[in-house]
């Protein structure tokens, strides 16, 4: 039995992790669930899984939740301390870190420090603080398993091979909904248009990141830390069919790819049950009916966010944290129709140029940079 703590259980990844747990009750037991403000959805999950504890954003949300589920079924906690408790709950084997955005960093660190197996969907933790998170995982013995489909693919392509024979990785990208949209039309992109992803069913923030290709940029930084790569060992490849989830190239020119349907449940289940595979009730990939697989280089002129992420990676220190925070603020402003689509990369670029980087070696440094970038972005949005 694998005891789970699911952080961000009412989001897109969290719901799918619950689906996996629900399909394999003999393998998984859910001990803790956390959400922000989706109280009704969380109450339903509590009824289904009967966890030991549930955590929400603040006291008000906690009161709403206990009104729905009562106090007897499970312990209800709230706020940053509550999230950290859920992430380090004794008896939990695997923590699924699926909180959206920078808010996932501190609970992810709590799980890492507690030596848990961390099934990581919250890429922001590694983007903001990759060096710190990996160093603390080394100290505590925590194992970090990727949930992001590309990183799960690379993880699978590395298995059974000599790490020192790797020459580079190919991160594939669908290209998002605007791959074939002429750049002249980018100015009139609305949130509704950007939220309609062709292949993947995801939450709002990551759908916008996918439309700007910032998602791939964040994944480049995530991959660097997760697999201990040099910047020049990471290549991005547009693959609109999203069948090849990523590849690893070895010194002899051999390339190993991992393929599957674009279904997040596969990568989630793999991280949850590693090193075993689960017999998932999903249809297999049908090569007789698969469209031709095509590949092309990314167009960073059209998608400057990808170039900005490589730039932040080169600048290092607290720059990736600034990239992430400015982007989060800009995406939120775009979703609220305060700025246009093209202003997202513009704001991120201004923030990177205006930032005076700190070392990025401690949490305070990183959280300062994050707060600074949000303030900077907010000021730029108002202008
Ligand atoms: Mg991904």
Image: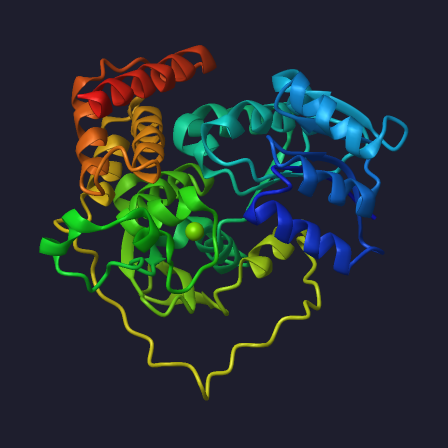
Q: Nearer the viewer, residue 226 or 81?
A: 81
Along the horizontal axis of the image, is 49 left or right of 233?
right
Compared with 220, 160 (above or below) is below
The percent position of residue 65, horizontal first and vertical second, equals 74, 29
Along the horizontal axis of the image, is 96 left or right of 105?
right
Q: Looking at the image, which residue is at 31% across and 24% down? A: 322
Q: Which of 12 and 110 is in front in this view?
A: 12
Which quadrant: the C terminus?
top left
Compared with 12, 31 (above or below) is above
Q: Which of 37 and 53 is in front in this view?
A: 37
Q: Looking at the image, which residue is at 35% across and 26% down? A: 325
Q: Looking at the image, which residue is at 70% across and 59% down? A: 276
Compared with 239, 95 (above or below) is above
Q: Quadrant of residue 24?
A: bottom right
Please count the marks in the image: 0
The percent position of residue 270, horizontal first and vertical second, equals 62, 56
The color scheme shown is rainbow
Q: Most extreme residue toward the left, as rendered?
A: 184
Along the horizontal axis of the image, is 46 left or right of 188?
right
Is any atom of residue 361 visible in this view?
no
Q: Looking at the image, which residue is at 32% across and 67% down? A: 240
The percent position of residue 241, horizontal first and vertical second, equals 36, 70
Along the horizontal axis of the image, is 329 left or right of 280?
left
Q: In which quarter of the image is residue 181?
A: bottom left
Is any atom of residue 248 visible in this view?
yes
Q: Which of 274 and 125 is in front in this view?
A: 125
């Amino acid at each position: 039995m694998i005891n789970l703590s699911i952080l961000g259980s009412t989001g897109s990844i969290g719901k799918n992790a619950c689906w996996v747990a629900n399909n394999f009750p003999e393998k998984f037991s859910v001990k803790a669930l956390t959400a922000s403000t989706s109280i009704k959805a969380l109450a339903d999950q509590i009824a289904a899984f009967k966890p030991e504890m549930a955590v929400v954003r603040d006291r008000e949300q906690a009161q709403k939740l206990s009104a729905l589920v009562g106090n007897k079924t499970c312990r209800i906690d709230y706020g940053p301390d509550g999230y950290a408790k859920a992430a380090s709950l004794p008896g939990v084997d695997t923590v699924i870190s699926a909180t959206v955005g920078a808010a996932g960093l501190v609970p992810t660190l709590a799980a890492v420090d507690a030596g848990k197996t961390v099934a990581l969907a919250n890429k922001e933790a590694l983007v903001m603080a990759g060096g710190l998170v990996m160093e603390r995982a080394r100290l505590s013995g925590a194992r970090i398993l990727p949930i992001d489909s590309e990183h799960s693919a690379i993880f699978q392509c590395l298995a059974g091979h000599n790490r020192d024979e790797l020459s580079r990785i190919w991160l594939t990208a669908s290209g998002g909904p605007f791959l074939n949209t002429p750049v002249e039309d980018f100015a009139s992109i609305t949130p509704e248009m950007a939220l309609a992803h062709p292949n993947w069913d995801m939450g709002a923030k990551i759908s916008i990141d996918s439309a700007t290709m910032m998602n791939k940029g964040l994944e480049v930084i995530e991959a660097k830390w997760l697999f201990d790569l040099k910047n020049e060992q990471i290549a991005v490849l547009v693959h609109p069919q999203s069948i090849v989830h990523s590849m690893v190239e070895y010194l002899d020119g051999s390339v190993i790819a991992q393929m599957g349907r674009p279904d997040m449940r596969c990568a989630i289940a793999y991280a949850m049950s590693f090193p075993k595979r689960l017999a998932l009730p999903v249809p297999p990939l049908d090569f007789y009916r698969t469209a031709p697989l095509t590949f092309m280089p990314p167009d960073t002129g059209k998608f400057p966010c990808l170039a900005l992420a490589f730039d932040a990676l080169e600048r290092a220190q607290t720059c990736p944290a600034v990239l992430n925070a400015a982007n989060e603020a800009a995406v939120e402003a775009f979703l609220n129709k305060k700025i246009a689509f093209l202003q997202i990369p513009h704001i991120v670029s201004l923030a990177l140029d205006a930032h005076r980087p700190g070392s990025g070696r401690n949490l305070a440094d990183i959280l300062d940079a994050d707060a600074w970038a949000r303030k900077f972005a907010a000021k730029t949005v108002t202008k």
